[in-house]
Amino acid sequence: MILDSSLVLPPTLRAELAGPPLPRRPWYRSLTPAYLMLAVWAPFFDRLWAIDLPRASLSCLAGNAVLAATLSYCLFYSPMALWGFRTRQRLGTVAASTFGTSGSEWITGVAIAAAAVIWYAVAIDSAIEYTLLGLRSCGLLSPQVLGRWDLGAIVLESPVFLCTAVFWIFITGMVSVLRLAGVIVALMRVYAPVALLLLTVTALALFPGVGEYRAADAMFVARVSGAADPAGSTGSMVVLIFGFLALAGFVSVDWGVASRWGRDVVLGGLTGLVLAISSAAVLSLVIVAGAVGQLQATDRLAEAMGAGPPLLSFRWAVWHGIGGVPAGVILILFGLVALAPACWCSGIYSRRLAIHWPGVPRIHWTWIGGATAWLLIATSGASRVDVIAAAMGLVFAPAVGAMAGDFLRQRGGWAGVRAGLNPPGLMGWAAGLALSSALWMAAGYFSPMVRGWLPPGPIAGFLTAVLVYWLVAGMGLERPSIALEEIDTELAPAETCLEKRA
């Protein structure tokens, strides 16, 4: 047997190939609940309309939300989930065809782990924000208790906020350490439909205000909050939806593996992604617009623009549009929804980092990630969900695009893994990342008319990655593929066996 050191499998692929297969479930028990949980997660819809509400009619905005969810299904979700379903191989293994074994290790292993740490911080921060705001609305907490620490160049959250963050990180971290994340996620899957019902009830309570809504009122609020500034394009609804769903589409390879039949892939995506995401976006639009109309009709709009939740956010609409104990209960219940994403993220980053760097125990990675998340929370970095979601779209949409280019080039087939680094995949991802980042950074320098004709950064990155993969692969720069049958995963799972080729 001749052993080529370049064909040694990295840890993530080795773990996937040696691990047990994923259990296969119908779409209504796997895909739909997972995407529904994302749809009713407060960071997704909280500031979804803060930028766009003053700029277009409500019907146009609702249509754009449905269109963005549908495009995400067609571009980000469908090719990835179908590839996982056809190959019955997990993300890291499938991506080793596009990026090579080494490239897949860093993109599907380390990069996803880093993203999970950031989303973990967002989940904890959102849970605390909503819970404390709910307690304030119920009259159980004084606003002075939540004042921030001003330490010169650094502004930290209040001691109550920071101590609560330590408690949440400890609880969710212990869930990961004790391998209880599956139990929590299963419970929250039951709660997800309840949260959607709660979102619907909240929209119905504020729906009468939609009749009183005027775009001029939203523009007035936007000028006060700074949302009318053209440079704030990172918070656009389209960019936020694509940013949230780019990473979700990337990992949907595993959802395809866990699907029983092809119709489970289609039905799960249509109901969980298109229907659930669109419904949550439209319901949150009704809530914010209804609150603006109701406040203007009762001459309380100017009063609602004082200190409090971010203007034109879901929290702001519930706080001022409903108010009192009912608003407090709504906010606290939506804060609890963050429990499942936090537990899921903690398990993801600790497991993937422990696999990539096995010298550090998984329990240590749990607390290293927790400490990193605490720093992001303490410095208010985790509260910039608009910037975080946009950045996730810039990074992961081109990765999905490169894999989609590989998927289309092979006509839906999969030849196997490619050793080392595969130039077409990495160059496609890098080109998509560069173009989407350039569009994002240059958006503030364009006039509103020009910027309106530019494609969203994640979509531009996705399409660029698809095109570059095709061009580079057409030049013959793809590395040779290796079928899984030629890899000895039983006796030496860390190495490839070339005995069949000899």
Image (cartoon, rainbow, N blue to C red):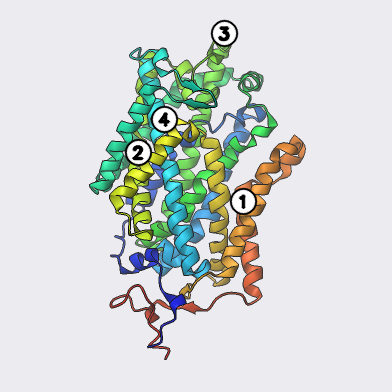
Which residue was labeled with disc 2?
A: 192
Which residue was labeled with disc 3?
A: 299
CA gap, disc 2 to disc 1? 29 Å
Place of residue 488 in the rendered image (x, y in percent of width and height, measured from the top left): 34, 79
Place of residue 91 in the rendered image (x, y in percent of width and height, measured from the top left): 43, 61
Which residue was labeled with disc 4?
A: 199
Q: Residue at x 46, y 69 (%)?
A: 101
Q: Residues within 10 Å of mark 2 (few under 14, many from 20)?
A: many
Element under disc 2: helix
Task: Tell which tag, 1 or 4, sits nearer the viewer.
Answer: 1
Which residue was labeled with disc 1?
A: 459
Q: Are marks 3 and 1 in contact (CB under 8 Å)?
A: no
Q: Are marks 2 and 3 in contact (CB under 8 Å)?
A: no
Q: Quadrant of residue 157?
A: top left
**Quadrant where the image shows the N terminus:** bottom left
Element under disc 4: helix
Q: Residue furthest front?
A: 152
CA gap, disc 2 to disc 4? 10 Å
Which amino acid, by three-letter code, is at mark 4? Leu
Which amino acid, by three-letter code, is at mark 1? Ile
Q: Earlier in the sequence, mark 2 or mark 3?
A: 2
Q: Earlier in the sequence, mark 1 or mark 4?
A: 4
Q: Are marks 2 and 4 in contact (CB under 8 Å)?
A: no
Which amino acid, by three-letter code, is at mark 2? Ala
Which amino acid, by three-letter code, is at mark 3? Asp
Q: Is residue 168 above or below residue 364?
A: above
Is residue 498 at least partly visible in the picture? yes
